[in-house]
Every structure is written in structure tokens, then in C-alpha cells.
Image: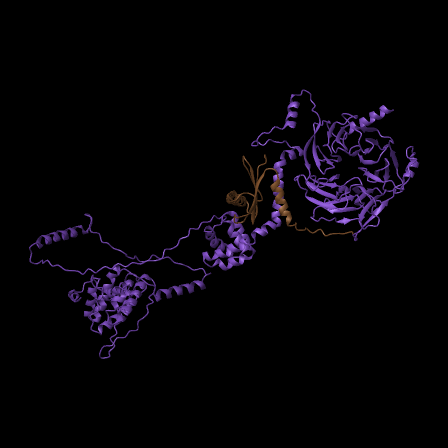
Chain colours: A purple, B brown
Amino acid sequence: MSTTRAKPKKPTLKVTPSSRVLNVSTSGVLRVNHSSTYARSINASVSRKSFSLAADSKILDKSSVQTPKHTVQVFDENGKDVTPQPLYQPDPAAVMSKHSKIFASDTSGGTMSDFYSTAYQTTTNASFAGPFTRSVFGSSTVSRGSQSTMESMNEEIEDPSSKRDISISLSDVQVRREEVKELIKEEMLDDVVDRYLIESETLWLLHMPAVSVSVDSEEAVSVKERNNLYMELCKNRMGNDKYVERSMQTFNGAPKTKEVQSEAITMVDAATTATTWDMYDSFRSAGLGEAALSPDTDKASVPEIVSNHRLDPTRAPERTMSVISTTSIASASSSRIEMEPFVVPSEDEPDPELVLQSEKFQQDLFVMERIILENIYQPKLAAYRQLPTLEDPDSVPKVVPTVVSRREESSLDEESTLTPALERLWSFSCELTSGHNVSSMAWNKRNPDLLAVGYGQFDFKDQKSGLICCWSLKNPTWPERVFTCESGVTTLDFSASNASQLAVGMHDGSIATYNVESREKTPVIDSSDCAHKHTSPVWQVRWIDHERGASGEDKGETLISVSADGRISKWFLRKGLDCIDLMKLKRTRNEKAKKQVGDKEKKSEALISRQAPGLCFDFHPTDSNIYLAGTEEGHIHKCSCSYNEQFLETYIAHKGPLYRITWSPFCSDVFLSCSSDWTIQLWRQDLFTPVLGFTSTQSAVYDVMWSPKWATVFGAVNEGRVEIWDLGASILDPTIVSLASPGVKLTSLLFATETDCILVGDSDGQVGVYQLKNLTVGEGTQVAALEDIIGSTLASQL
Amino acid sequence: IATFLGRKLQPRPQNEVEETLKRIQGQKGVQGIIIVNAEGIPIKTTLDNSSTVQYAGLIHQLVMKARSTVRDIDPQNDLTFLRVRSKKNEIMIAPDKDYFLIVIQNPSD
């Protein structure tokens, strides 16, 4: 260590305190070892401090020096203040010298104390740091006087500063400066600050002088000279006494390996797709009060979910936000792993039960059922809707005998007309309705796909409880609504003004209205406690729209019913009260009618009641004041709402109870009637004898209905068959006849309004839907044709 | 008794779900019904376990993709129904926030 003394002051070699400082700092890692060699451990700490200060200030070059002034005062043995003054004050403007200045001031502050501490104690310190060659310098410093060291320090500092490796720790100085900066920032945040950009002095970080010089430059000559001199010198060196070879040994420090082990840094890959809807959802729920939560939870939860077992990573964030808002708020700041238990358990438990019972699920089931049925019934429904039916290209082609063969026949036929026929599409039936007799059917006025069917026996003998089913075309296997009634349903009608209101007349004389929209099983209004309710089966109900009511105030729709107790009653709701009032339209007695018209057939009948049981009625399509009523005797009475005492006209032709009267929808003075005397009669209202009569079989005709599309077409149902009559084709025979299945009686008929289909109800509870095929009636509604027929018939009768 | 009942919308009876499910199961060509909850775990099924799990997993992904597509085009829109028609059968899926209802039908059976 003491060999260092021999070394003179050489700028390149003089590091001394700074180098010592360097040593200390670099050996700071090993400082435990080295500082222990010191008698004064303060050395190490101080020098470290000074070094760090120096280093920091080196970095913070342009700043004004904020050096902690070490107020160190040095006194020699005599008590004289020999505190050395710093050679020069630090000047922020000058950069180059600043380095050294700062070092000087700092290190002077630091190393001074360091130095002096060493100076007052004879030491063997200094070159403690074995490994470094610069330890040489440390001791050389010690040997010098204070002043010289200052100078040497200054000189030394410049060079080694470039050689230094800096292990820096943030010092107080640096921190303080940053704090100041921040304060400024906050205050002056909004101000416009002017910044001036100046070109600073050039910092030389590394200067490697070139080892070669261009031949053309000015130095070339001197360089060449020097080179020559050197070459001479080298030549002379060999064997020259002036040059002595000498070797030196340098210490090589023993290297020590140090191993550090750190825990493996767990990496998690996180990925997310920012979809448009994801962002939309986040913004929406953020706007709803979960504020800044959502983007954070999004980010926090997404990597979470990727590692989850969930199958829907992108859905989970929105769910966590919407469902578990509170827990996610709590966990947003927590680690990822903590979030998982918040999310998972609360989702799982209520699910299976709630899901199955939820309304939405029922709705979905409902829709699903319809879709499945649509798949099954698609060809039939398409035929109903008069759409072309397509063959499923993937289905196995089956042999469909009836339709295909007919098509083949028809294609082979050379005749232009094909046989009109009824093609059965499907039937509305389910196990609820089997065994019930279909008594009436009605379409909904607003939704032509909705059908109400009433089930009830006609005979008084085997009465069962009645049933009303509302069927939708979209589900032929199960009714949309099922209402059970105490007694058999004999008639029903949908209201036109309130499309969900269904009026039902029953075999025990009661009338009820149901609201088919609701799921309640009970009627909205019932006539049971009305004083004037019907006492015998209600055979027909109808909603009639009056332009002006009988009493002058009842505009709108009213419910009219006819019953076997001989009354046609008008029902309406009195305002404010729940009960139903009715206005009776008294029916004239049989005797009166008989007396008026003159009778040949009924003289010997005994009178049971003075009222004739009414079985059917129909209001005039255009004049709602006039209506026709049919009785059990076979009389048709034309009545007016304004006269409730007398009939206007009476038509007598039938010999049995009239089951149906219906005005023609096209010719306003033509109507049809059918009765149990096997006949259907066509009347014109000004003639008292029927224009045409139609008979085909010897069975009672239960129902007859005009086609809504053609004036000359009507359908009729008797016990065993359905008949479609086209008067334009033939007035003697029905155009289409379709037989019922054996054992089943056909009881009611309904034309579909928009398409060429008819519905036939039978006594087994089935409502079959048939399509009229190949019924060529001609263009238009055939009104003229009908009138022609009538006219020609009349003419021929005369 | 003249009764006038308010027109409230009554909740459907609980057994109606079962009835409807039975009816669907009994329709022509229906091969199976699967009800899956939001995480893809089957709640109710009429198929065997392995098929159920397979259907549930695959269909879940498909519905997610379909829904993402629909909503990407218009975030206010949402998927209401999905039908996949194949050579042998048709898969009908009614997706919801909390569940999927999946029905497999072969209409030409």
C-alpha cells in the first residue's frame, strides 16, 4: 500500500478523495468488509455520502447547486481556524467547469470532512480498497498537505469522473428538487408558460482523439516528426543504458461470484377484444351511475376471465358490472385473483330454478314450440296461406299418393278444368277436446289467425261441461287459451271493437264474456245474476254495431242474443255498474204469427209457451236495424229494432227448426236458411217464397254459410258430409262433397276470410281445415251471376 | 255471481313449463331439448350426457359469436333466435342473458 508514495502528482493518476469516495461507494456493496478495516467507520459513510452527492450533482448538471453545506470547521492544534475555503464558488452558467465545480464543492464538503478526519489521525487507511488500482491514490492523498490535496482534488476530479462508474442512489438533493418542481407545477397548471429554447454548451461525454492524422492537415508535419523521433527512440532503446526494463506486479483481486435468486415472475397473458358492443355496454352502464368503475372492472376482470373456466369471456364483464356491481367495486382495486370468488358463486346458485320459472323462459318455450310446429306443418300452412309449397330438398322423398296422383292425373288430363275437391290440411285438436262436440266457431276480428271454438252438446240429453278453446294457426296441436264452462257452449262471437272480447252463450241460458288476452280462466262478465237472463239455451250471440241505437244513446257495439225462451235480448254494460242490463225484444207469439200468415200445418199443436224458441238470427249487413230471426217452428221473421212488438215480415217455408239464417254478404236482399228438414232455402227478402231450394241428402243441415269471396258459393254441413255449392256451376247438386269419418257427425262450418279454406267442426272435438281446390268460379265476386241465377229462376217459375 | 276481474297479467302457472316441455318433446321429429345456463352447464336435457355436453359447449360458442356479430353491427340490437338448418336436422336456439334453450328437430321424420 505504501508503494503508492512514490508516485508523483500526475493528473491522470490523481483521484484521491474522490477516488476514495469512489472506492467506498463501489465497495459500498462490500462495505461491510471494508469499512470494518477502518478505525473510523464514519469515513465510509461520509465519503459515501459525499460521493453520492457528487454523483447526483453530476447528473443534475444544470441545476443550481443545492449542496448540503457541510458546516465543517477545522481547527489545528492551536485552535486556529484553518478551515479551508473552497477554491471557487459553483457557477450554474458554466457547464464544463461546473462538473468539477460541483464536485469540488460537494466533494470538498464531503471529502473535507473525510480528509480531515483522516488527517488528524495517523492512518493507514486510504488504500483500503484492495481491488482497485486507485487505492494508490488514496494513500498519496494522505501524505500530502491539505492545500495540495485540494488542488489535486480538483485536477483529479476531472479525469476520473469520466472513468467513474456510477452507482447511484437517489439522494435527498434529488428528491428535494423534484418536489419543488411539483409544487410549481400544481400552482401554475393553467398558466401559459413561455419556454425558451437555447442551445446549450456542448457536453463532451467521450472524446477519443484520433490516432491517425490526414497527410494534408497542418499537424501532419509535426506528427510525422514526432513519429520519427519515436522511431529513433525505439531504435536507441535497445542496449541503451538510459532505458531500464522494470517489471511491476499488480494485484489481481480475487473475484467473488455472487448469486442472486429471485422468485419467478408470474406472467399472465391477457387478451381482450374490444368489440363495439362491449364498449357500448360499458358506456351505458357507466352512465347509469357506476361511473369510473366500468373501464377498470373491464380491464381488471378481463384477464381474470381468460383464466376462468368460463366459455364467454367477453360477456362476463358486462355481467359482472350489471349483476354484481357492489362486489366488483370492492374488488376493482384488489388483485385479480381476489376477484374471482366474487364473481362466480353468486351467479351459480339461483340459476337453474329461477331460469326455468322465469317469464322469459316461458316465452321462449312458447316461441320454440311454434317454430317446431311450423317446421312440421310448413307445407300445410303454406297451402293455407296460398303460398307455393316447396319440397324440402334434403328430405327423403316419400310416396304421397293422393296429391301426387291427382297432379299426375291432372297433368295428363286434357280437360281444362280439374275436379274441385277439398283437401284436408290439418285439424285443430288435442286431448282436451276429444269427445266434445264442436258447436260453434268464430274468427277473431282483428287477428285472422286466431280462432275461437266452442264445445258443447246440442241435445239436452248428454250435457257435459262446456269448453272454449282459442286456437292459433301457428299451433294446431295445443290451444292458446282454454276456458272451461259449467254448461255446454252453444255459440260464441268475437267483438269487433274490442278484439279480445269473446261473448259466449251457453246451454243453460247464461251469457259470459271472456277476455282472451289475459290468462284468467274466468269470464270477465257473467249474466248469471241478472234478473232477466235467459232461461233456456242461448242459441246465438252476436256483436252488432249500431249506427244509432234503439234508444238513441247506444252507439257502438252491443251484444244481441237469441234463446230458446223466445226472446231476443240486447245486452250492454250500464256505465258505472258491473251488472248487465238488457233490453228485451219481445217476440210475438206463435199464434200471432200463425194468425197473420195463415197456417195449414200447425192447427192441432198444443201450446206450451207463448213464445217460440228462437234458434238463429242475422242482422242485415248494411242496415243494422233490420234482422231476421228463425224459430223452431220453421218461420223466419224479419224484424226491426225499432219495433219490438211486431214483425215486419214472416217467411214460412221450412218444416222444421231453422238452424241458420244468413244474409248474403254481396247481394243485400238475398239470404239463405237451413233447417232440419234437409233443405237449404235461398230467399229474396221481397218474396215470401224461397227462390231456390237445395237438397242433397236426407239429413238435417246444421250449418250453412256464404263464402266471403264469391257470391254464388256457399257451404253447408249436414250430419254426414260437407257440401260446397256453387250456384254458378249447378243449382241442383253441390259442387264438392266431402264425407265425414264414420261415426263422426259434422256440426259446424266456417269459411276462412283470407284464403280458400273452410273449417269443419265435428262431434269428436276436431276442427278440420280444408282447402278448396280447383274451385273455378270465375272472375270477381259473381254478384251479377247470382242475380242472374235468381232472375232466371224466377222467370222460369212464372 | 257477476264477477268482474281486473285485467292484470297473471303469472303463468308453474306446471305450464313442464307441460310445454312435454308437448315440445312429443312433437314430431324432436330429437332433444337442452336447457343450458349462462356458463354453459346444462340444467335440463332429454339427450344423453355426452351429446348434451357436446351440444352445450359448441352451441355456446356459436351463439356468442352470432350475438357478437349482431351487436357489433348495431350495439342496440340483440340476438333473439338462431336456427341452424343442416342436412339431417335443425337446431333451434333461443338465447337469453341467463340461459339457452336448444331444440334439435328432424322435421322430415
Residue A542 spot, x, y in % from top left: 79, 41
Quadrant that contains the C terminus of chain A: top right
Residue sitting nearer the eye, A727 or B45: B45
What quarter of the picture does the N terminus of chain A occupy? bottom left
Q: Which quadrant of the structure image shows residue A637?
A: top right
Q: Nearer the viewer, residue A321 or A633?
A: A633
Q: Position of residue A794 (x, y in %)?
A: 85, 26
Compared across the picture, whether B107 is left or right of A629 comes to left
Relative to A242, B102 lies left or right: right
A223 left or right of A733? left
- Residue at the spot x=45%, y=58% of the render? A335
Q: How many marks?
A: 0
Q: Is residue A414 left or right of residue A132?
A: right
Please name the residue shown 28% across and 69% down the image: A46
Residue A4, quarter of picture: bottom left
Q: Position of residue A178 (x, y in %)?
A: 38, 63
* Residue A186 screen position, x and y as percent: 44, 63
**Is residue A332 in sight in this rendering?**
yes
Which is nearer the eye, A166 or A558?
A: A558
Which residue is more in the foreground, A717 or B46?
A: B46
**Quarter location, residue A145:** bottom left
> Does residue B78 appear anywhere in the picture?
no
Furthest residue to the top?
Answer: A414
